[in-house]
Amino acid sequence: MEEKEKNIPLIGDDFPEMTVNTSHGEIDLPNDFEDKWFILFSHPGDFTPVCTTEFYSFQKKYDQFKELNTELIGLSIDQVHSHLKWTEWIEEELGEKIEFPIIADGTGKVANKLGLIHGANETSTVRAVFIVDPKGTVRAILYYPAELGRNMDEIIRMVKGFQKSQEEGVAIPANWPENELVDDRVILPPAGSEEMIETRKKQEEDGEIECFDWWLCHKES
């Protein structure tokens, strides 16, 4: 069977190289964020109610993202002057200066390349989130409908979880770090051999880890 050509990046793919026009000038993606995580998020349009609450929230959390070596970059099918006027309004009326760049995708070329146009409406993007690691690999993709604003704390939790998983070779449980079974502990990858099963049992006996069974073990982070 002939493999279908992928038109949009998927989890595990390299983020496509592109030069974009933004409210901060031209940016080369993903190269200008080399050695950093970055989050590209699209919004339906400037001067819209839910999007305004999101940009306010992203900016309020911006320092937390930067502490995680993570940058933000927004996107919509609007012109640069619209982005600049909108962020000026947010600063003057809501008291928050938007410090991260916003892609001006007036032609929709970037949105189409990233798969941000859903349904029949080609004049606005869905609320999408791409989480990209320092190697330029797409680690997560989230989509939201126009009527539902995003949860910034969940996006921060995801970045923390990816970084923890990468640093320690572990998996992250549901609702971490407040999981109902293991609290803030992390999950060990399932044992893949009889030898590893015996190793896990020995680790449990020694108090290094705790297990519900040999295939479901956890430890302190």
Image (cartoon, helix red, strand yellow):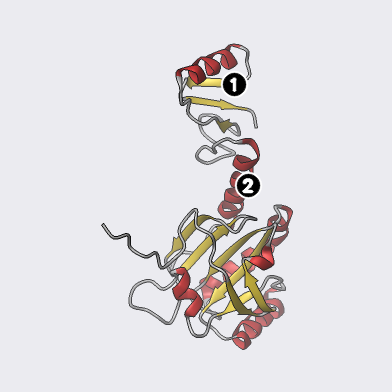
Q: Quadrant of the C terminus?
A: top right
Q: Please tell me whether residue 65 is drawn above or below residue 42 in the rendered image.
A: above
Which image quadrant for residue 136? bottom right
* Badge 1 amino acid: Ile
Answer few, some or many: residues within 10 Å of disc 1's Cα (few below 14, many 20 plus, some between 14 and 19): some
In-image side of 163 versus 142 (left or right): right
Residue at (33%, 63%) from the top-left corner?
Answer: 4
* Badge 2 amino acid: Lys
Residue at (57%, 65%) from the top-left corner?
Answer: 40
| Secondary-structure class at tag 1 | loop
In-image side of 69 versus 159 (left or right): right
Q: Foreground: 5 or 72?
A: 5
Q: Please tell me whether residue 176 is drawn above or below residue 15 in the rendered image.
A: above
Disc sitting over residue 160 in the figure: 2
Q: Quadrant of the N terminus?
A: bottom left
Residue at (72%, 58%) from the top-left corner?
Answer: 66
Give the image location of residue 210, x and y in percent.
56, 20
Answer few, some or many: residues within 10 Å of disc 2's Cα (few below 14, many 20 plus, some between 14 and 19): some
Give the mark count.
Answer: 2
Instruction: Give how far apart the Cα atoms at labels 1 and 2 are.
Output: 22 Å
Q: Please tell me whether residue 119 is drawn above or below residue 72 in the rendered image.
A: below
Residue for badge 1: 209
Q: Foreground: 190 or 177?
A: 190
Give the image location of residue 167, x and y in percent.
65, 40
